Amino acid sequence: MVALNGLEKFSHLEDKIYRTIELAKTLRQEKDELERQLATVRGLGGDKQQLIAQIERLLAEREAVRTRVQAMLEAVAAADPELAEAIRG
């Protein structure tokens, strides 16, 4: 009876070891998936920063063009007030 009890204990221990191994495999897979997701999110954050920089650059370019057009309109107004009125109007 003692031998059977020892075998039962060994069998339970063996089951626990196998369950622990399966749990470790599952946790490793989940960790790998989370690392992939994190890399994706970090990549998106980089894209976001790149887009923000591009928007800021485009806004600065737009302001520069606006300033140049305003200067040209003022030059036209100084040279020919009638033409300037026609352009505005």
Image (spheres, helix red, strand yellow):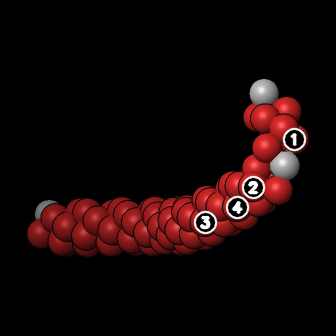
**Location of residue 25 in the rendering, given as x and y in whole percent from the top left corner:** 46, 69
Residue at x-position 57% and y-position 69%: 53
Residue placed at 78% from the left, 27% from the top? 89
Kind of residue sitting beneath label 1: Leu
| Residue contact between numbered discs 2 and 4, judged by CB atoms under 8 Å | no
**80 left or right, relative to 18:** right
Q: Which mark is residue 83?
A: 1
Q: Amino acid at mark 3?
A: Ala
Viewer can see residue 33: no
Number of callouts in the render? Answer: 4
Residue farthest toward the left in the current orientation of the protein: 2
Residue 60, label in figure: 3
Residue to which mark 4 is pinned: 71
* x then y, percent, for residue 52: 55, 63
- What secondary structure is marked by label 3? helix
Could you tell me how far apart the alpha carbons at marks 1 and 4 are, in whole angstroms? 15 Å
Depth check, front residue: 64 or 83: 83
Between the C-alphas of marks 2 and 4, the distance is 11 Å
